[in-house]
Image (cartoon, rainbow, N blue to C red):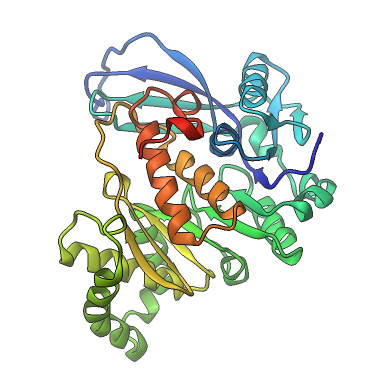
Amino acid sequence: MNRRADVVVVGSANADLVVTVARRPSAGETVLGDDVTTIPGGKGANQAVAAGRLGASVALLGAVGADQYGELLRESLRSANVDTGLLRTADRPTGNAFITLTPDGENTIVVSPGANASVLPADVAAASSEVAAAKVVVLSLEIPLETVRHAVEAASSAGVRVLLNLSPVASLDEETLGRLDPLVVNEHEAAWLLTARDSAQEDSAQDSAQEDSAQDSAQEDLAQDSAREVSAQDSADAARYVEIARRLRALGPRSVVVTLGAKGAVTSDENGTTVIAAPEVRAVDSTGAGDAFAGALAVGLAADRPLADAAAFAARVAATAVTRVGAQPSYPTSNEVIS
């Protein structure tokens, strides 16, 4: 590395192979699409580029292959001022993501990990000084879970804030969950995690008491939010999102962010639970929007912003990104972020 990075991303780097179709095919069906576009992506690289475009000091720890896709990714990272000193060249091909995009801006994605599967705990150990010097370490789950757990423990033990985006969704042990600050999930990932972790407790007296009090306390939280923070959802929806965030935090993470796409986000930490609105935009391509959010959230946290403020900023960055095509090419600089 050339310098100490405030944000160290430990994660994947993929070449996104994107094809636009009029509609998604059903099982066993073939549909024709437009020409394939190759775009630099991968959750780790996306998060790093999003943070770099916003002016953060950022480095990516990961792996790419010795191929044209690896060079594409290195160039994209360098152009966003991301330090690639921790990006290793592996003996496997660069990871690929096969993305089908429909006119409404929605997508489906299949990922072939490639070199990302070779990112090992030893790579994190070799970068221990860089990890310990960061303000925020960012992780997602397109690299081996063993490596994720090791990175979380190494960063947390060094007093570094750990942001983990639970995507693709997978089960985490209680010790790892307890080190996250924040755990970042979307609605689907939240539902999966709560079902996997909380189903055995749903009938307990404690959970019943929490569920009974959630509706009343949610209204109090929402009444205290500023106009910027209050979402356009009605009170019943807002209360449901507040309850989801609180139940997730009860699983052990120090703080939680639930992203809601066009509906904004919900944060929960020691300062309370906050519903945050997203700007209204015309979405063109949602690919990588969650990574834009996570990268921007890391930038805010590295600047010592409160979690709710950092998430509000991240929601504006993600809203800006969905108005453009592609993942990394869509990410704004700080002066391009929608107000």
Which quadrant: the C terminus? top left
- Give coordinates of residue 335: x percent, y percent: 47, 32
The picture quadrant where one finds residue 154 is: bottom right
- Along the viewing direction, whichever of 56 and 267 lies nearer the viewer: 56
- Along the viewing direction, whichever of 232 and 75 lies nearer the viewer: 232
- Along the viewing direction, whichever of 140 and 317 lies nearer the viewer: 317
- The answer to whether 109 is drawn above or below residue 222 in the figure is above
The picture quadrant where one finds residue 56 is: top right
- Give coordinates of residue 58: x percent, y percent: 67, 39
- The answer to whether 252 is drawn above or below residue 84 in the figure is below
- Along the viewing direction, whichever of 51 and 303 lies nearer the viewer: 303
- Give coordinates of residue 62: x percent, y percent: 69, 37
Rendered residue at 63%/42% (across/down): 11
- Give coordinates of residue 168: x percent, y percent: 48, 46
Q: In the displayed image of the protein, which residue is found farthest to the bottom?
A: 205
- Let me know if residue 131 appears in the view: yes
Rendered residue at 26%/58% (across/down): 227
- Let me know if residue 140 appears in the view: no
- The answer to whether 139 is drawn above or below residue 289 in the figure is below
- Total marks placed: 0
Rendered residue at 62%/43% (across/down): 143
Horizontally, residue 255 falls left or right of residue 148, namely left
Which quadrant: the N terminus? top right
Rendered residue at 70%/54% (across/down): 151
The picture quadrant where one finds residue 258 is: bottom left
